[in-house]
Protein backbone atom coordinates (compact mmCIF):
# COMPACT_ATOMS: atom_id res chain seq x y z
CA UNK A 1 0.00 0.00 0.00
CA UNK A 2 1.32 3.41 -0.90
CA UNK A 3 1.82 5.82 1.93
CA UNK A 4 3.22 3.38 4.43
CA UNK A 5 6.57 5.16 4.39
CA UNK A 6 5.15 8.16 6.24
CA UNK A 7 5.81 8.68 9.93
CA UNK A 8 4.69 11.56 12.16
CA UNK A 9 6.30 12.05 15.56
CA UNK A 10 5.28 14.12 18.59
CA UNK A 11 7.00 11.99 21.27
CA UNK A 12 10.02 14.25 21.12
CA UNK A 13 10.53 17.21 18.76
CA UNK A 14 7.84 17.44 16.07
CA UNK A 15 9.04 15.36 13.12
CA UNK A 16 7.69 14.12 9.81
CA UNK A 17 9.51 11.50 7.75
CA UNK A 18 8.79 10.09 4.32
CA UNK A 19 10.64 6.89 3.48
CA UNK A 20 13.14 7.66 6.24
CA UNK A 21 13.85 11.22 5.10
CA UNK A 22 13.11 14.07 7.54
CA UNK A 23 11.00 16.83 6.01
CA UNK A 24 11.63 20.55 6.59
CA UNK A 25 8.70 21.89 8.61
CA UNK A 26 9.56 25.57 8.83
CA UNK A 27 9.64 27.86 11.83
CA UNK A 28 7.96 27.50 15.22
CA UNK A 29 4.63 29.04 14.17
CA UNK A 30 4.32 26.92 11.06
CA UNK A 31 5.23 23.84 13.09
CA UNK A 32 2.56 24.84 15.64
CA UNK A 33 -0.06 24.76 12.89
CA UNK A 34 1.04 21.29 11.82
CA UNK A 35 1.17 19.99 15.42
CA UNK A 36 -2.32 21.34 16.15
CA UNK A 37 -3.74 19.63 13.05
CA UNK A 38 -1.88 16.40 13.77
CA UNK A 39 -3.09 16.20 17.36
CA UNK A 40 -6.69 16.65 16.17
CA UNK A 41 -6.43 13.06 14.80
CA UNK A 42 -8.17 13.80 11.51
CA UNK A 43 -10.86 16.06 12.93
CA UNK A 44 -11.39 19.50 11.32
CA UNK A 45 -9.78 22.39 13.19
CA UNK A 46 -11.45 25.81 12.80
CA UNK A 47 -9.23 28.56 11.47
CA UNK A 48 -9.89 30.58 14.64
CA UNK A 49 -8.50 27.73 16.75
CA UNK A 50 -5.33 27.60 14.66
CA UNK A 51 -4.90 31.37 15.11
CA UNK A 52 -5.41 31.01 18.87
CA UNK A 53 -2.94 28.12 19.04
CA UNK A 54 -0.25 30.13 17.24
CA UNK A 55 -0.66 33.51 18.95
CA UNK A 56 -2.57 32.77 22.19
CA UNK A 57 -4.84 35.81 21.99
CA UNK A 58 -2.15 38.22 20.74
CA UNK A 59 -2.68 37.70 17.00
CA UNK A 60 -1.88 40.50 14.53
CA UNK A 61 -4.43 41.81 12.04
CA UNK A 62 -2.89 39.58 9.34
CA UNK A 63 -3.17 36.39 11.44
CA UNK A 64 -5.72 34.62 9.21
CA UNK A 65 -3.72 35.26 6.04
CA UNK A 66 -0.53 34.18 7.78
CA UNK A 67 -2.03 30.87 8.92
CA UNK A 68 -3.32 30.25 5.41
CA UNK A 69 0.20 30.82 4.07
CA UNK A 70 1.58 28.34 6.63
CA UNK A 71 -0.96 25.76 5.42
CA UNK A 72 0.05 26.37 1.79
CA UNK A 73 3.73 25.84 2.61
CA UNK A 74 2.99 22.65 4.55
CA UNK A 75 0.91 21.36 1.63
CA UNK A 76 3.84 21.97 -0.67
CA UNK A 77 6.21 20.11 1.69
CA UNK A 78 3.91 17.05 1.81
CA UNK A 79 3.29 17.12 -1.96
CA UNK A 80 7.00 17.43 -2.80
CA UNK A 81 7.88 14.49 -0.52
CA UNK A 82 5.34 12.20 -2.20
CA UNK A 83 6.10 13.34 -5.74
CA UNK A 84 2.68 14.96 -5.96
CA UNK A 85 0.99 11.90 -7.46
CA UNK A 86 0.55 9.50 -4.52
CA UNK A 87 -3.17 9.25 -3.63
CA UNK A 88 -2.28 7.64 -0.30
CA UNK A 89 -0.01 10.49 0.81
CA UNK A 90 -1.07 12.73 3.71
CA UNK A 91 -3.02 15.82 2.65
CA UNK A 92 -4.06 19.09 4.23
CA UNK A 93 -7.73 19.50 3.32
CA UNK A 94 -9.76 22.68 3.59
CA UNK A 95 -13.06 22.37 5.44
CA UNK A 96 -15.87 24.79 6.22
CA UNK A 97 -14.00 27.47 8.11
CA UNK A 98 -10.85 25.43 8.83
CA UNK A 99 -8.54 22.59 7.88
CA UNK A 100 -7.89 18.96 8.70
CA UNK A 101 -4.91 16.68 8.21
CA UNK A 102 -5.84 13.50 6.31
CA UNK A 103 -3.13 10.90 6.84
CA UNK A 104 -4.53 8.63 4.15
CA UNK A 105 -4.96 4.84 4.03
CA UNK A 106 -1.69 4.21 5.85
CA UNK A 107 -3.34 5.47 9.02
CA UNK A 108 -6.50 3.41 8.52
CA UNK A 109 -7.41 -0.04 9.82
CA UNK A 110 -5.59 -1.72 6.93
CA UNK A 111 -2.29 0.03 7.63
CA UNK A 112 0.61 -2.09 8.85
CA UNK A 113 1.29 0.31 11.75
CA UNK A 114 0.13 3.66 13.02
CA UNK A 115 1.90 6.46 11.23
CA UNK A 116 1.66 8.72 14.31
CA UNK A 117 3.97 7.64 17.12
CA UNK A 118 1.58 8.60 19.92
CA UNK A 119 -1.13 6.33 18.50
CA UNK A 120 1.25 3.41 18.35
CA UNK A 121 2.41 4.21 21.89
CA UNK A 122 -1.17 4.23 23.21
CA UNK A 123 -1.98 0.93 21.49
CA UNK A 124 1.14 -0.80 22.81
CA UNK A 125 0.64 0.44 26.38
CA UNK A 126 -3.01 -0.63 26.37
CA UNK A 127 -2.01 -4.07 25.10
CA UNK A 128 0.77 -4.30 27.69
CA UNK A 129 -1.53 -3.43 30.58
CA UNK A 130 -4.16 -5.89 29.37
CA UNK A 131 -1.53 -8.65 29.23
CA UNK A 132 -0.30 -7.75 32.70
CA UNK A 133 -3.84 -7.96 34.05
CA UNK A 134 -4.25 -11.38 32.41
CA UNK A 135 -1.05 -12.71 34.02
CA UNK A 136 1.17 -12.54 30.91
CA UNK A 137 3.94 -10.53 32.53
CA UNK A 138 6.58 -11.33 29.90
CA UNK A 139 4.30 -10.34 27.03
CA UNK A 140 3.35 -7.18 28.93
CA UNK A 141 6.98 -6.27 29.45
CA UNK A 142 7.74 -6.68 25.73
CA UNK A 143 4.88 -4.38 24.70
CA UNK A 144 5.60 -1.72 27.32
CA UNK A 145 9.33 -1.60 26.60
CA UNK A 146 8.57 -1.22 22.90
CA UNK A 147 6.13 1.59 23.68
CA UNK A 148 8.65 3.50 25.78
CA UNK A 149 11.25 3.06 23.04
CA UNK A 150 9.17 5.32 20.78
CA UNK A 151 10.04 8.36 22.89
CA UNK A 152 12.82 10.56 21.47
CA UNK A 153 12.73 13.14 24.28
CA UNK A 154 10.07 15.28 25.99
CA UNK A 155 6.80 15.38 24.05
CA UNK A 156 6.68 18.29 21.56
CA UNK A 157 10.11 19.26 22.86
CA UNK A 158 10.58 22.06 20.31
CA UNK A 159 7.10 23.51 20.95
CA UNK A 160 6.74 23.20 24.71
CA UNK A 161 6.71 26.98 25.12
CA UNK A 162 3.68 27.33 22.83
CA UNK A 163 0.72 27.96 25.22
CA UNK A 164 -1.77 26.21 22.95
CA UNK A 165 0.23 22.97 23.03
CA UNK A 166 1.31 22.92 26.66
CA UNK A 167 -1.76 21.01 27.85
CA UNK A 168 -1.18 18.28 25.27
CA UNK A 169 2.51 18.07 26.19
CA UNK A 170 1.54 17.60 29.86
CA UNK A 171 -1.01 14.92 28.90
CA UNK A 172 1.56 12.99 26.90
CA UNK A 173 4.09 13.22 29.73
CA UNK A 174 1.47 11.74 32.09
CA UNK A 175 1.01 8.86 29.66
CA UNK A 176 4.75 8.26 29.61
CA UNK A 177 5.02 8.25 33.39
CA UNK A 178 2.13 5.80 33.67
CA UNK A 179 3.82 3.55 31.07
CA UNK A 180 7.08 3.64 33.04
CA UNK A 181 5.19 2.51 36.16
CA UNK A 182 3.47 -0.28 34.25
CA UNK A 183 6.76 -1.42 32.71
CA UNK A 184 8.37 -1.51 36.15
CA UNK A 185 5.44 -3.51 37.48
CA UNK A 186 5.92 -5.97 34.60
CA UNK A 187 9.64 -6.21 35.41
CA UNK A 188 8.77 -7.10 39.01
CA UNK A 189 6.20 -9.64 37.86
CA UNK A 190 8.85 -11.23 35.62
CA UNK A 191 11.20 -11.58 38.59
CA UNK A 192 13.51 -8.77 37.40
CA UNK A 193 13.60 -6.34 40.37
CA UNK A 194 17.04 -4.98 39.43
CA UNK A 195 15.71 -3.98 35.99
CA UNK A 196 12.75 -2.32 37.70
CA UNK A 197 15.15 -0.31 39.89
CA UNK A 198 17.07 0.87 36.82
CA UNK A 199 13.83 1.86 35.11
CA UNK A 200 12.43 3.77 38.11
CA UNK A 201 15.40 5.69 39.53
CA UNK A 202 15.17 8.66 37.18
CA UNK A 203 11.36 8.87 37.22
CA UNK A 204 11.22 8.73 41.02
CA UNK A 205 13.90 11.43 41.31
CA UNK A 206 12.19 13.74 38.79
CA UNK A 207 8.76 13.30 40.40
CA UNK A 208 9.41 13.03 44.14
CA UNK A 209 5.78 13.80 45.07
CA UNK A 210 4.30 11.17 42.74
CA UNK A 211 3.66 8.22 45.04
CA UNK A 212 3.34 5.53 42.36
CA UNK A 213 7.02 5.47 41.28
CA UNK A 214 8.19 5.79 44.90
CA UNK A 215 6.13 2.77 45.99
CA UNK A 216 7.29 0.68 43.03
CA UNK A 217 10.91 1.67 43.60
CA UNK A 218 10.61 0.72 47.28
CA UNK A 219 9.26 -2.71 46.28
CA UNK A 220 12.04 -3.18 43.74
CA UNK A 221 14.78 -2.14 46.18
CA UNK A 222 13.37 -4.47 48.85
CA UNK A 223 13.29 -7.40 46.45
CA UNK A 224 16.94 -6.81 45.52
CA UNK A 225 17.92 -6.97 49.20
CA UNK A 226 18.28 -3.20 49.66
CA UNK A 227 15.82 -2.82 52.51
CA UNK A 228 17.60 0.11 54.16
CA UNK A 229 17.48 2.13 50.91
CA UNK A 230 13.77 1.34 50.49
CA UNK A 231 13.00 2.57 54.02
CA UNK A 232 15.14 5.68 53.53
CA UNK A 233 13.24 6.42 50.31
CA UNK A 234 9.94 6.20 52.21
CA UNK A 235 11.25 8.61 54.84
CA UNK A 236 12.32 11.17 52.25
CA UNK A 237 9.05 10.88 50.36
CA UNK A 238 6.94 11.24 53.49
CA UNK A 239 8.84 14.34 54.61
CA UNK A 240 8.38 16.00 51.24
CA UNK A 241 4.67 15.19 51.14
CA UNK A 242 4.17 16.61 54.63
CA UNK A 243 6.38 19.66 54.13
CA UNK A 244 5.29 20.64 50.61
CA UNK A 245 1.70 19.41 50.38
CA UNK A 246 0.68 19.02 54.02
CA UNK A 247 -0.54 15.43 53.49
CA UNK A 248 0.51 12.00 54.73
CA UNK A 249 1.44 9.25 52.26
CA UNK A 250 -1.48 7.47 50.60
CA UNK A 251 -2.63 3.91 51.20
CA UNK A 252 -0.45 2.35 48.49
CA UNK A 253 2.83 3.83 49.68
CA UNK A 254 2.00 3.15 53.31
CA UNK A 255 1.14 -0.48 52.55
CA UNK A 256 4.52 -1.06 50.91
CA UNK A 257 6.29 0.56 53.87
CA UNK A 258 4.47 -1.66 56.36
CA UNK A 259 5.14 -4.78 54.30
CA UNK A 260 8.87 -4.02 54.33
CA UNK A 261 8.84 -3.38 58.08
CA UNK A 262 7.08 -6.72 58.63
CA UNK A 263 9.61 -8.47 56.39
CA UNK A 264 6.80 -9.89 54.30
CA UNK A 265 7.93 -12.14 51.46
CA UNK A 266 7.53 -10.61 47.99
CA UNK A 267 4.27 -11.43 46.22
CA UNK A 268 4.32 -14.26 43.66
CA UNK A 269 4.91 -13.39 40.03
CA UNK A 270 1.74 -12.21 38.37
CA UNK A 271 2.72 -14.33 35.38
CA UNK A 272 1.93 -17.42 37.45
CA UNK A 273 -1.72 -18.14 38.15
CA UNK A 274 -2.17 -19.57 41.62
CA UNK A 275 -5.24 -21.02 43.28
CA UNK A 276 -6.54 -19.36 46.48
CA UNK A 277 -5.27 -20.88 49.70
CA UNK A 278 -7.49 -23.42 51.45
CA UNK A 279 -9.91 -21.80 53.87
CA UNK A 280 -9.36 -18.31 52.43
CA UNK A 281 -12.44 -16.16 52.93
CA UNK A 282 -14.51 -15.48 49.83
CA UNK A 283 -16.18 -12.45 51.39
CA UNK A 284 -15.08 -9.09 50.04
CA UNK A 285 -12.17 -7.44 51.79
CA UNK A 286 -13.27 -3.88 52.60
CA UNK A 287 -11.02 -1.80 54.91
CA UNK A 288 -13.07 -0.29 57.70
CA UNK A 289 -11.81 3.23 56.93
CA UNK A 290 -12.92 3.11 53.32
CA UNK A 291 -15.58 5.75 52.66
CA UNK A 292 -17.88 5.89 49.66
CA UNK A 293 -18.18 9.52 48.50
CA UNK A 294 -21.63 11.07 48.56
CA UNK A 295 -20.89 13.02 45.42
CA UNK A 296 -18.06 13.04 42.87
CA UNK A 297 -18.00 15.66 40.13
CA UNK A 298 -16.60 15.17 36.66
CA UNK A 299 -16.64 17.16 33.43
CA UNK A 300 -20.25 17.02 32.29
CA UNK A 301 -21.44 14.42 34.78
CA UNK A 302 -21.88 13.59 38.46
CA UNK A 303 -21.14 10.37 40.34
CA UNK A 304 -23.33 9.48 43.30
CA UNK A 305 -24.34 6.27 45.13
CA UNK A 306 -26.71 4.17 43.06
CA UNK A 307 -30.38 3.83 43.99
CA UNK A 308 -33.19 1.42 43.12
CA UNK A 309 -34.46 3.99 40.60
CA UNK A 310 -31.03 3.98 38.96
CA UNK A 311 -31.12 0.19 38.85
CA UNK A 312 -34.36 0.32 36.90
CA UNK A 313 -32.78 2.78 34.46
CA UNK A 314 -29.59 0.74 34.50
CA UNK A 315 -31.57 -2.30 33.36
CA UNK A 316 -32.93 -0.32 30.42
CA UNK A 317 -29.49 1.12 29.65
CA UNK A 318 -27.84 -2.29 29.72
CA UNK A 319 -30.62 -3.82 27.59
CA UNK A 320 -30.13 -1.11 24.96
CA UNK A 321 -26.34 -1.47 25.13
CA UNK A 322 -26.13 -5.27 25.22
CA UNK A 323 -24.25 -5.59 21.91
CA UNK A 324 -21.88 -2.81 22.96
CA UNK A 325 -21.23 -4.45 26.33
CA UNK A 326 -20.76 -7.87 24.78
CA UNK A 327 -18.12 -6.40 22.47
CA UNK A 328 -16.41 -4.83 25.51
CA UNK A 329 -16.69 -7.68 28.02
CA UNK A 330 -16.93 -10.68 25.67
CA UNK A 331 -19.60 -13.31 25.17
CA UNK A 332 -19.60 -13.94 28.92
CA UNK A 333 -21.82 -10.86 29.19
CA UNK A 334 -25.31 -12.38 29.40
CA UNK A 335 -27.30 -9.98 31.59
CA UNK A 336 -30.09 -9.07 31.34
CA UNK A 337 -31.59 -12.07 29.54
CA UNK A 338 -33.63 -11.10 26.47
CA UNK A 339 -37.42 -11.22 26.23
CA UNK A 340 -38.24 -10.91 29.94
CA UNK A 341 -41.81 -10.51 31.13
CA UNK A 342 -42.47 -7.62 33.49
CA UNK A 343 -42.59 -9.95 36.53
CA UNK A 344 -39.38 -11.68 35.48
CA UNK A 345 -37.81 -8.29 34.93
CA UNK A 346 -38.63 -7.25 38.52
CA UNK A 347 -37.13 -10.50 39.83
CA UNK A 348 -33.94 -9.82 37.88
CA UNK A 349 -33.84 -6.28 39.21
CA UNK A 350 -34.26 -7.46 42.81
CA UNK A 351 -31.47 -9.99 42.33
CA UNK A 352 -29.25 -7.30 40.84
CA UNK A 353 -29.81 -5.03 43.85
CA UNK A 354 -29.04 -7.95 46.19
CA UNK A 355 -25.78 -8.55 44.33
CA UNK A 356 -24.81 -4.89 44.83
CA UNK A 357 -25.49 -5.16 48.56
CA UNK A 358 -23.65 -8.47 48.94
CA UNK A 359 -20.65 -8.06 46.68
CA UNK A 360 -20.05 -4.44 45.77
CA UNK A 361 -18.76 -1.93 48.26
CA UNK A 362 -18.66 0.85 45.70
CA UNK A 363 -21.56 1.32 43.25
CA UNK A 364 -22.13 4.70 41.63
CA UNK A 365 -24.58 6.11 39.14
CA UNK A 366 -23.16 8.37 36.42
CA UNK A 367 -25.82 11.04 35.89
CA UNK A 368 -26.32 14.24 33.93
CA UNK A 369 -26.08 17.29 36.27
CA UNK A 370 -29.04 19.08 34.68
CA UNK A 371 -31.77 16.42 34.92
CA UNK A 372 -30.25 13.50 36.88
CA UNK A 373 -30.61 11.30 33.79
CA UNK A 374 -28.61 8.07 34.06
CA UNK A 375 -25.59 8.07 31.71
CA UNK A 376 -23.75 5.01 33.02
CA UNK A 377 -22.75 2.98 36.07
CA UNK A 378 -19.63 2.19 38.09
CA UNK A 379 -19.23 -1.02 40.11
CA UNK A 380 -16.27 -2.02 42.27
CA UNK A 381 -16.10 -5.68 43.28
CA UNK A 382 -13.59 -6.04 46.14
CA UNK A 383 -11.38 -9.15 46.33
CA UNK A 384 -11.72 -11.77 49.03
CA UNK A 385 -8.16 -11.05 50.14
CA UNK A 386 -6.32 -7.70 50.43
CA UNK A 387 -3.43 -9.07 48.34
CA UNK A 388 -5.63 -9.70 45.32
CA UNK A 389 -7.01 -7.35 42.70
CA UNK A 390 -10.28 -5.52 42.96
CA UNK A 391 -12.42 -5.55 39.80
CA UNK A 392 -13.60 -2.17 38.57
CA UNK A 393 -16.41 -2.29 36.01
CA UNK A 394 -17.88 0.75 34.38
CA UNK A 395 -19.78 1.53 31.24
CA UNK A 396 -21.63 4.42 29.68
CA UNK A 397 -24.46 4.59 27.22
CA UNK A 398 -22.17 6.63 24.96
CA UNK A 399 -19.90 3.61 24.60
CA UNK A 400 -16.14 2.94 24.88
CA UNK A 401 -13.93 5.65 23.42
CA UNK A 402 -16.57 8.37 23.69
CA UNK A 403 -15.82 11.70 25.36
CA UNK A 404 -17.99 10.71 28.33
CA UNK A 405 -16.24 7.35 28.65
CA UNK A 406 -12.80 8.99 28.58
CA UNK A 407 -13.82 11.67 31.10
CA UNK A 408 -15.22 9.01 33.44
CA UNK A 409 -12.02 6.98 33.11
CA UNK A 410 -9.95 10.03 34.06
CA UNK A 411 -12.12 10.82 37.09
CA UNK A 412 -11.99 7.22 38.33
CA UNK A 413 -8.22 7.12 37.85
CA UNK A 414 -7.79 10.15 40.08
CA UNK A 415 -10.01 8.57 42.73
CA UNK A 416 -8.22 5.22 42.48
CA UNK A 417 -4.77 6.72 42.89
CA UNK A 418 -5.67 9.01 45.80
CA UNK A 419 -8.32 7.22 47.87
CA UNK A 420 -8.89 3.56 47.13
CA UNK A 421 -7.11 1.16 49.48
CA UNK A 422 -6.60 -1.68 46.99
CA UNK A 423 -3.12 -1.79 45.58
CA UNK A 424 -4.19 -3.35 42.28
CA UNK A 425 -7.31 -2.55 40.29
CA UNK A 426 -8.24 -4.71 37.30
CA UNK A 427 -10.68 -3.44 34.70
CA UNK A 428 -12.23 -6.47 32.99
CA UNK A 429 -13.08 -5.94 29.38
CA UNK A 430 -11.25 -2.62 29.12
CA UNK A 431 -8.38 -2.10 26.68
CA UNK A 432 -8.04 1.69 26.92
CA UNK A 433 -4.99 3.14 28.70
CA UNK A 434 -5.07 3.23 32.50
CA UNK A 435 -4.49 5.79 33.84
CA UNK A 436 -6.57 7.40 31.15
CA UNK A 437 -5.44 10.50 29.28
CA UNK A 438 -6.79 13.70 30.87
CA UNK A 439 -9.77 15.17 29.05
Image (tube, rainbow, N blue to C red):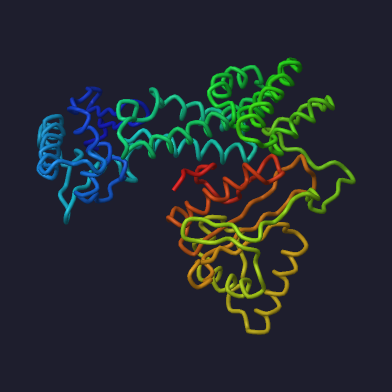
Q: Is residue 25 above or below residue 64?
A: above
Q: Is residue 107 left or right of residue 272?
A: left
Is residue 407 or residue 340 the one in the foreground? 407
Closest to the observer, 124 or 242: 242
Q: Residue at x 10, y 35 (%)?
A: 84
Q: Quadrant of residue 357?
A: bottom right
Whole-percent x, y for residue 89 in the image: 19, 38
286 in relation to 201, above or below: below
Instruction: List the single residue furthest toward the bottom.
Output: 342
Q: Which residue does the image show at 76% across and 38% down from the upper left?
A: 274
Q: How many marks?
A: 0
On the question of residue 223 being in view, the answer is no
In the image, taking residue 299 as reference, residue 238 lies left or right, namely right
Residue at 65% across, 36% down: 246
Image coordinates of residue 53 in percent, x first then y, are 26, 41
Would you place residue 373 above or below residue 114 in this image? below
Q: Is residue 326 left or right of residue 229?
A: left
Tell me residue 412's x, y (percent): 58, 50
Amino acid sequence: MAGRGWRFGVLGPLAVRCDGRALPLGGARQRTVLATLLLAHGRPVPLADLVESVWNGREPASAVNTVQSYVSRLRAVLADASGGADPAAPRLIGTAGGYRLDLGPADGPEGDAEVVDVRRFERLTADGRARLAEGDAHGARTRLVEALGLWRGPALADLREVPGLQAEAVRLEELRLAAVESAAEAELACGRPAAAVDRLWRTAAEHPLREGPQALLMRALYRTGRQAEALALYGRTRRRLVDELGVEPGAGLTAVHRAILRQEPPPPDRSAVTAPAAGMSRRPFVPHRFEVPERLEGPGFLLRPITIRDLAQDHALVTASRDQLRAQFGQAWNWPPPDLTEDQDLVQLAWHQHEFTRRTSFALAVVAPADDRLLGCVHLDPPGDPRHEADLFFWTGAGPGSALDRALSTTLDHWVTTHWPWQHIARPGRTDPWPAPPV
